[in-house]
Structure formats: C-alpha cells, structure tokens
Image (cartoon, rainbow, N blue to C red):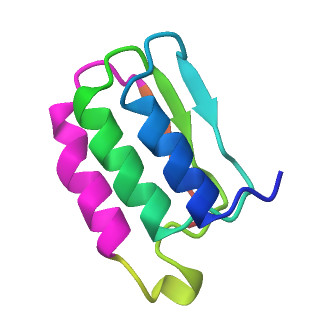
Amino acid sequence: MNIDDEQGKIIGMYLRRNTLLRSVSLEGNLCGPKTAMEFGKALQVNTTLKCLNFDSNQLAAENGSDKIGIYEFVEFLPKNTTLLSLSISNN
C-alpha cells in the first residue's frame, strides 16, 4: 500500500481511541520513526489491539539512521498488557 511515515503516524494516532480493531498489519510499507513513536504512545492506552505486524518497514529510518522512534516504541511497550503478537523483523 506504500503507507509512508506520515500516514503511519496518523494510523497510530487513531489507535489511541480504537475500541474495535484487534489486528493491524502494516507489513511491507514505508513506515518510519514517526510511526514507531506514535504506535508506542498508542500502545500505552490501547486495550483492544492483540496483533501488530510491522515487518519490512523502515522503523529506524533507512540504514538505521534514526533510532529514536524504535527507542520510544520499546519504552512504551511494557505499559501495554493486551498485545499478544508483535512482529518487527526486517526493519
């Protein structure tokens, strides 16, 4: 779908208020650090998401040049108690 970092960030923002979605797959897109950071924030408050797939994106930017989004994502992750499956390979 070629979802870029700005679009991924918006999806993450909407997940803060999500009460229906149980699974999100953004595999093979162009999501980057902004998306990672926003999803981290969303996972702090989201209690319905069970599965999240970020395989084959650019969460640390191209060539790993911007790791702040990943750091923020990982920092917020322990606050989520409902996520059962997370896939972030090839980032």
User: Hey, which residue is sitting farthest right in the picture?
Assistant: 1
User: Does the stretch in magenta take in 18?
Assistant: no
State the image coordinates of residue 39 (x, y, percent, origin top left): 40, 46
- Give above or below for 83 relative to 75: above
Is the residue 22 above or below the residue 24 in the image? above
Which corner quadrant holds the C terminus? bottom right
Determine whether, in the image, residue 17 is placed left or right of residue 41: right
Q: Can residue 90 be seen in this snapshot?
A: no
Q: Which quadrant of the figure has residue 46?
A: top left
Residue under the image location 44 percent in, 65 percent down:
34
Residue depicted at 48% across the width and 57% down the height: 35
Query: Is 8 on the left or on the right of 49, as rendered?
Result: right
- Name which residue lies at 67% across and 60% down: 56
Which stretch did the figure color magenta? 68-84
Up-down relation of residue 61 to residue 57 (above or below): below
Total marks shown come to 0
Question: In the rendering, at what x and y percent does residue 68 appear?
Answer: 30, 74
Measured as percent of width and height from the top left, residue 69 is found at: 36, 67
Q: Main secondary structure of the magenta part?
A: helix
Q: Is residue 74 magenta?
A: yes
Quadrant location of residue 70? bottom left
The part of the image, by quadrant, that contains residue 33 is bottom left
Q: Residue at x 58, y 70 (%)?
A: 58
Relative image position of residue 78 (x, y in whole percent): 18, 38
**Residue 42 in view, yes or no:** yes
